[in-house]
Image: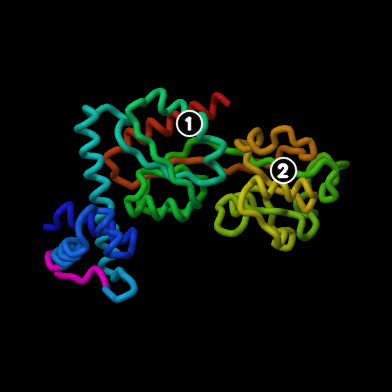
Amino acid sequence: MPTIKQLKYLIALDDSRHFGNAAAACFISQSAFSIAIKELESTLDVQLIDRTNKSVIVTAAGAAVIKQARLCMSDLKTLVDIVTSGQEPLSGRLTLGIIPTIAPFLLPSFMTETLKRFPKLQLYLREDKTAVIYEQLLDGKLDLILVALPFQMKNVTVMPLFEDPFLLACRRGSRWVDASKDEMDFDALPDESVLLLEDGHCLRDHALAACHVRDSDQVSRFSATSLQTLLQMVVADLGITFIPAMARHSLIGGESDLELHPMPKKSVREIGLAWRKGSSRSDEFTLLGELLQKLHQAT
């Protein structure tokens, strides 16, 4: 059977894609590191790495082994945490992935309350797009992820937490919005009037679906990489946009040129936690989810 040390070396090599750097990260010589990788390949009777003078290329079999190795190491860390913490819930190391359109609005209160209730918890955060942190979850690099739904995911347990309504954001007196009408007619929005985040952000897809924007010509050719930038474009009256309600206080502040309007129809995204199916820490993750629900209800 492969040893834990061999799996650890293989993961380090995958992270750095360089034998010398990976060996240094594992605090052993490069020659000893190379021998360990070769011994692992011999044990498994498969080539994991294609070695060239300039690069390290992981084979298809190697990629599958590395993915499972990360899960094995994650389970071993959980095993150690259970022993060292005396089986106390939410203690030890926990890695949470979170998307940029949730992180700045939920994390301040969540971090404060979580560390107050669970002082032995070592919470590490990684912020990135949904597709990225979902892959990292499956690869064992993250323990759980906090995302906006819907998002198609397999081999995970999803815990829906709460709904986050969309609000229409426009400049005061905007040329794009007819203030004389009591209800916004989205079908009548001019071409190039809807500003959104760039492709790859799930908020873009959620906004289009939840806010019933059906005509692609209404969506501006210009996009933003963050909600803050998006609102600056709205302030300049380059168009209107839709923002999640959880962001309204953090993003707007004292900006007097912006107006926020409730949507005429139910237009929401759902916030949820997700973790790998069968995780030994499912009960702990549920505790975190319940805490997030309480914090949301208190706002």
Q: Which mark is residue 168?
A: 2
x, y percent for residue 158: 41, 43
Query: Farthest right residue?
Result: 180
| Residue type for callout 1 | Phe
Q: Residue at x 77, y 46 (%)?
A: 235
Q: Which mark is residue 14?
A: none
| Residue type for callout 2 | Leu
Give the labeled residue for mark 1. Answer: 110
Q: Residue at x 85, y 50 (%)?
A: 175
Q: Residue at x 28, y 61 (%)?
A: 13
The quarter of the image holding the N terminus is bottom left
SS category of the residue bearing label 2: strand
Residue 269 location, quadrant: top right
Residue 20 location, quadrant: bottom left
x, y percent for residue 172: 82, 41
Residue 32 forms part of the magenta stretch: no
Query: Which residues are drawn in magenta?
Result: 42-50
119 vs 61, left or right, is right
* For the residues bearing labels 2 and 1, Cβ distance under 8 angstroms: no
189 vs 269, left or right, is right
Q: Is residue 158 visible?
A: no
136 vs 31, left or right, is right
